[in-house]
Image: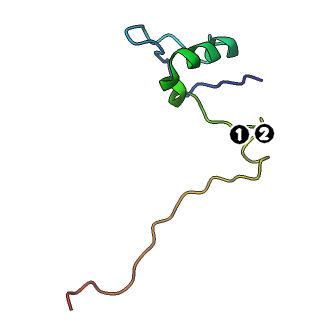
Amino acid sequence: MKKYILKPGMHQFTPGSPAIHSNDNLTDDEAEWYLQCHPHIAKLFVERPENGESERQAGGTRRKRRARRISGSFTNQ
């Protein structure tokens, strides 16, 4: 199982270079090297739990936040 998973699409790691990196052609060793040289690219990778467990195994759940409705009238008093 890969340690570093890119978000979908082709990505550019080095300024001025073409967007050629994807999960199909990037190894974990290359990803570590690029992250050391260009820490700003961390946002291009999917975040994973530290211990290697999936989010559900770690007890986390993703829930959408619902907007709260505020009842009452908004009049100046």
Q: Quadrant of the C terminus?
A: bottom left
Bin the neighbour count of mark 2 within 10 Å (Cα to Cα): few under 14, some 14-19, many 20 and up. Answer: few
Residue, x 48% and y 15% (percent of image)?
A: 13
Which label belongs to residue 53? 2
Q: Are marks 1 and 2 in contact (CB under 8 Å)?
A: yes
**Which residue type carries mark 2?**
Glu
* Residue 6 on image: x %, y %: 58, 25
Between 53 and 38, the residue placed more toward the observer is 38
SS at mark 2? loop
Which x, y percent locates residue 39?
52, 23
Image: 51 above or below 24: below
Q: Is residue 23 left or right of residue 39?
A: right
Above or below, 77 relative to 3 = below
Q: Amino acid at mark 1?
A: Pro
Q: Nearer the viewer, residue 65 or 48?
A: 48
The image's colour scheme reads rainbow
- In this rendering, position of residue 18 left or right of residue 74: right
Q: Quadrant of residue 22?
A: top right
Q: According to the image, label 1 marks what residue?
A: 49
Q: Position of residue 34 (x, y in %)?
A: 56, 14
**With 14 as the anchor, is 33 left or right in this view?**
right
Q: Residue furthest top?
A: 17
Quick one: which residue is furthest to the front in this view?
36
- The structure residue drawn at horizontal position 61% and vertical position 13%, both measured from the top left corner, is 33
Q: Please name the residue shown 42% across and 8% down the image.
A: 18
Is residue 24 shown to the viewer in this render?
no
